[in-house]
Amino acid sequence: MDVDPRQYENIKINDNDSHNIILSYLIHGCYKDTVESLVASTGLKVSGPQLENMEKRKRILHSALKGNALDAIALTEQISPNLLENNKDLYFDLLSLHFVELICSKKCTEALEFAQAKLTPFGKVPKYVEKLEDFMALLAYEEPEKSPMFHLLSFEYRQHVADSLNRAILAHGNLPSYSELERLIQQATVVRQCLSEELGKDVQSAFSLKDFVKS
């Protein structure tokens, strides 16, 4: 039966469906303790291999977020062999995290030596040149956090790299790289945008997911 998307408020959601969507998000984000609590309270099932994979990914993501990129690289190679060898973009991003950590620790000589050994080879590929120049420019500033490239030192940048790494590891293991919740949000956003376009002048402003969540 076709349902008018504008009547979504009247559609009832099964509790098990909601629980599974939440569980998918928690597993994706490596929230192991919360997963175990949800499983205990709802009776949902999570396999041993899923829990083990989650714990391994959690260690990797924690290392990346803390700036321990070399540890993240080593752990990734253990559970996902050849992933970084075949994903040069991700490998470059992880190496850049280590370079940034050296800069933040005022180890500029070590940072320069690391860049020459590990990052400079990427300069032979055109798409990396601009990014490489931005990272190397950090060496010219006594206070790199006040430079035009300050965003490369931010937690948000580390989070971006960690998220990309997590998705890549999941895809490498033939697992969904996006959680069910993320997919639902993507689909809902598209549907609402289409409805806004269909209604045209009756809509005061374009659809905003952020505003919708707050409403």
Image (tube, helix red, strand yellow):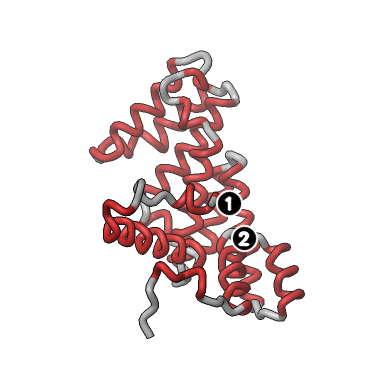
Identify the residue shown where x is 62% and y is 60%.
Answer: 30
- Give x and y (percent) for residue 154: 53, 33
For the residue marked with disc 2, what is the amino acid? Cys
Identify the residue shown where x is 42% and y is 31%.
Answer: 115
- Give x and y (percent) for residue 111: 49, 27
Report helix, strand or loop for mark 1.
Answer: helix
Whether residue 80 is visible, yes or no, is no
**Residue on which disc 2 sits:** 30
Along the polypeptide, which appears first: circle 1 or circle 2? Answer: 2
**The N terminus - image quarter:** bottom left
Depicted 21 relative to depicted 206: above or below = below
For the residue marked with disc 1, what is the amino acid? Leu
Depicted 79 relative to depicted 108: above or below = below
**Residue on which disc 1 sits:** 61
Work out whether residue 146 or residue 194 is closer to the camera in this orientation and state it.
194
Query: Answer yes or no: do the residues labelled 1 and 2 have beta carbons within 8 Å?
Result: yes
Residue placed furthest toward the top: 142
